[in-house]
Image: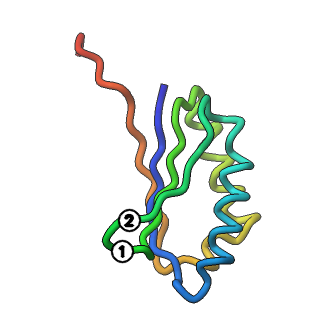
Amino acid sequence: MKHAYVYYRIDPVQAGLAARRIDALLDALARYCSQRPRRLRRCDDPTTWMEIYEDIADFAAFSAALDRAVLDLDCAGTTVGERHLECFSAFDPAS
């Protein structure tokens, strides 16, 4: 299983709107994950947010759905700069 981490900065003036849009995004992508996706913010910089998506079986389908939903919900309209997607998987001691 794969895990996705998306981080970015939000426009602090639009924090309420950003929260609503990102929460809708998490709801839309929940079906690709075995656990409910989460939104976090950086402890020392509340304008840096992170989305966490865990246990994704089909990462290609998830990634395509994420791209579509970000556009449909205009998530980029409340961010400053780019959204960064990182993919991680569990460590396999055999490799």
Residue neighbourhood size for the residue with mark 2, other residues' Cα within 10 Å, grouped as few (<14), some (14–19), many (≥20): few
Q: Residue, x 48% and y 58% (percent of image)? A: 40
Whether pointer 2 and pointer 1 mark residues with C-beta atoms closer than 8 Å, the reply is yes
Q: Nearer the viewer, residue 16 or 31?
A: 16
Residue 30 falls in image quadrant: top right
Where does the image place residue 72, in percent across and percent down from the top left?
76, 64
Q: Nearer the viewer, residue 66 or 45?
A: 45
Residue 16 falls in image quadrant: bottom right
Residue 60 falls in image quadrant: top right
Residue that carries the numbered disc 2 in the rendered image: 42
Label 1: element kind: strand
Quick check: 28 above or below 90? below
User: Disc 2 residue type?
Assistant: Arg
Quick check: 4 above or below 55? below
Separation of marks 2 and 1 at Cα, in angstroms: 5 Å
Quick check: 12 above or below 22? below
User: Disc 1 residue type?
Assistant: Asp
Q: Residue, x 63% and y 68% (percent of image)? A: 19
Residue that carries the numbered disc 1 in the rendered image: 45
